Image (spheres, rainbow, N blue to C red):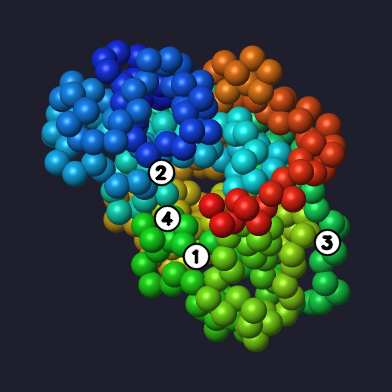
Amino acid sequence: MLGGSPTAALHEGPLMANGFSWRKRALLRQFTQRQDIRFVRRTAQVPREATLLLWGSNALLPGLAPEVRVVRLEDGFLRSIGLGADLTLPISWVIDPIGIYFDAREPSALEVMLQDGFYDQDLLTRAEQFRHKVVAAGLSKYNLSAVPWCRPQTHKPVLLVAGQVETDASIATGTIDIRTNMALLQAVRQARPDAWVVYKPHPDVMAGLRRAGTQDSQALKWCDEVVLQESLPQMLASVDEVHVMTSLIGFEALLRGKTVVCYGQPFYAGWGLTQDRHPHPRRTRQLVLDELVAATLLLYPVYVSQTTRKVCSPEQALGELLAWRSQSPLDLVWWRRWVRPFLRRA
């Protein structure tokens, strides 16, 4: 799988899909490179020799024949200029025929790559170059407009605690004991009473597209500072440590050489690169950073060009993200702010 296309498994046989919105159906054809996908609602519509596509952690159709191959899809790690919940088109998805990367309970194609894959020097050099470009450009998953942030004038170590949408599937499937933002914040404060703790809520929450976490309004009881619209890449460059449940911010911090403490079991934990409160029993390999980068950003995702709508290389997608960001995203998506209340109800 390391040397092949992520969509190779989808090139033959009937391809069915369940649970995709009308908006995602056109995207599904682009990312799978198949125009003959059948969208189904009932188990009886899925032949035994078919492959069934599901989004994220969506449940299987009841009574599905064991011969049916299930493939799950989800947003990639460099997604867009703007929030997915704002209906911004993605530039990357992941397509996983084993599981899905955020569900630590079962293996995924990404976990298999990390546990068993071989990474030659050419691939590692490519991953290193890609990582440097991402960091130098200040890219993250959503690449939102932001206001500057200054490190506080303190001799204490500065810790960033990443909030999440508490109903997110990665919390349901990737945590052990801490499952809320405030439980995470309290645990960090208890473990590091010596630190200046900064809490950043999830951008979907700040945009009003997802509900705030339980007791999020009380965050200042356990932290020194709450930041809302501040630049995430700038913060990651300035803080000393990042503490997460399963947030992708932990991975983005690793790219920048930061200490990352995981209270859950995200895909990037368990490989010797993070401090893990709950080590994962399946993940026994010690990786170097660019092995993680090669699998996560080069091999596992599928990238689709914003101009041609065809599958493209990670490097081309990276260039398009930079060009997209330079086009003043606030001007491009002004109308999304107006429709956010309707999106939240939906």
Q: Amino acid at mark 2?
A: Gly
In what element is the residue under mark 4? helix
* Identity of the residue drawn at 56% across and 40% down: 77
Callout 3: few (<14), some (14-19), or many (20+) C-alpha neighbours within 10 Å? some
Residue sitting nearer the eye, 148 or 256: 148
Callout 1: few (<14), some (14-19), or many (20+) C-alpha neighbours within 10 Å? some
Residue 265 in view, yes or no? no
Q: Amino acid at mark 4?
A: Ala
Residue 56 shows which numbered tag? Answer: 2
Residue 149 shows which numbered tag? Answer: 3
Residue sitting nearer the eye, 104 or 83: 83
Examine the rendered structure and indicate whether residue 264 appears above or below residue 49: below
Residue 96 shows which numbered tag? Answer: none
Callout 2: few (<14), some (14-19), or many (20+) C-alpha neighbours within 10 Å? many
Mark 4 lies on residue: 169
Q: CA distance from mark 1 to mark 4?
A: 8 Å
Which quadrant of the view contains residue 139? top right
- State which tag comes first along the sequence, 2 or 3: 2
- Give the x, y percent position of residue 319: 72, 25
In what element is the residue under mark 1? loop
- State which tag comes first along the sequence, 4 or 2: 2
Mark 1 lies on residue: 166
Q: CA distance from mark 1 to mark 3?
A: 25 Å
